Amino acid sequence: MAGIKKHSDQFKELVSPYLRQKIAEAEETFGPNSRELHAITNQYFYDAREKIVDNRQNRRHYEAEMHPEFDGQPVLGIERLYRRTILIEPTLVCAAHCRWCLRGFYPAKTMKEDDITHATRYIGSKELRDDVDEVLMTGGDPLMSLPLLALTLGELTRNAPNIKTVRIGSRVPFQDPRRINDDMISLFNRYSNFKFEIGVNVCHPIEFWPESVEVLHKLQNVGIRIYNQHPLLKGVNDDYETLNELYDLVRQNGVEGHYIFHAIPIRGAAHHRTTLMDGARLASLISSSGKFSGRTKPHYAVLSDIGKIVMYEGTILKRREEDNAVLLQSGYRLEERLKWNPNWVQPESVEVDENGFMRTWYLDAAKELENEIGQDTPDQGKKNVVFLNGTN
């Protein structure tokens, strides 16, 4: 049946030795059934509920890849949704696999030296240089390979003088902090022509381990700004006290609060998702709690088919009961998206309003589906739900 994934297509479990050590310490300190232990294991350990897939969910959170040609050759490894920022993915290797990963079903790849050189020349080309001044290095985790990081920064310096800011998405400080060593710090110092920012994904206060805090401060001491954006995850951080403690520690450690994301409708991850309204209630409560500095308050946002949409009053236009989807209003204009990424294809979920702004249908978490997939014997008659290695 269409929509059933093969077993070999499952996202491989990968837990770094550092995380395994922290999991053992948490079990000894807090107990085998503690929320602190589950806050780590729920993020990294495979769960049988991943076998249950809703056909309405996506394999990718959005399609933003570009397939331009430059100097007669295709440009690989880049994505673009926004005017000022272009994304490059030197590698899709990580220290550990988050079970809610946005790119868990992306094909594994590492860019070759020639690919990186070609991509950076395109980023610095006449076509982009007047608009693009920021590169987001992601993947995978760019801090997993010092040679690839050095190569990318060197080629950006050489070929794209329009780039002023380099943002790096990384969980290495919390998955394998030993990698942030003196050689890496020296590399950042060498490329002081860039303003560096590192976005981490700290989901629970237990993750502020001493080793992680130490490397955060090491990065901050050379002028790198650290910011946090993370998903709202069931059984990890979907309660008021945990979020208050998390953002208090974020502030204490000089980290900027940026986004708290509603967990996206990626296939096999429904058990991680709260409803949009539950997330909005929590975001409102923590923003008005007075328990941590207001300088750390995150934006509650959705990663939709067209990019990030912050959940303000009036963002939800209507609900479609038959599939529990909501129509979200964005500030993205279709004509601008096509200007920035001519290869971009308007998703089926998107409508364009009378002013040219895009609206997109977004799959909310269904409480009845959440309850259903948590059972040992799921209801195989449920429409749109399929089971890996089985039939429906």
Image: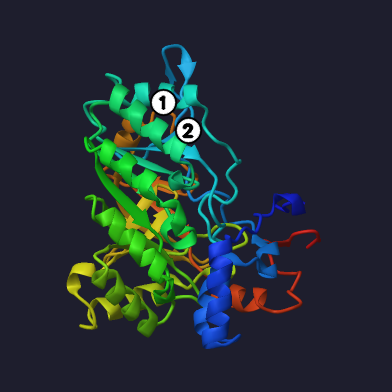
Q: Give the residue type at disc 2.
A: Gly
Q: Earlier in the sequence, mark 1 or mark 2?
A: 2
Q: Are marks 1 and 2 in contact (CB under 8 Å)?
A: yes
Instruction: Tell me where residue 283 sits by quadrant.
Output: bottom left
Q: In front: 142, or 102?
A: 142
Is residue 23 depicted above or below 117 in this figure?
A: below
Q: Is residue 317 visible to us here?
A: no
Where disc 2 sits, the SS reads loop
Give the CA distance from mark 1 to mark 2. 8 Å
Q: In the image, 110: left or right of 199?
A: right
- Say which of 91 and 47 sits in front: 91
Any mark on residue 130, and which? none
The percent coordinates of residue 100 (x first, y second) are 53, 61
Q: Nearer the viewer, residue 348 or 127?
A: 127
Q: Up-down: is 347 above or below 285?
A: above
Q: Secondary structure at mark 1?
A: helix
* Colouring rule applied to residues: rainbow
Q: Residues within 10 Å of mark 1 (few under 14, many from 20)?
A: many
In the rendered image, residue 377, in percent from the top left (x then y), is placed at: 76, 77
Q: Which residue is mark 1?
A: 119
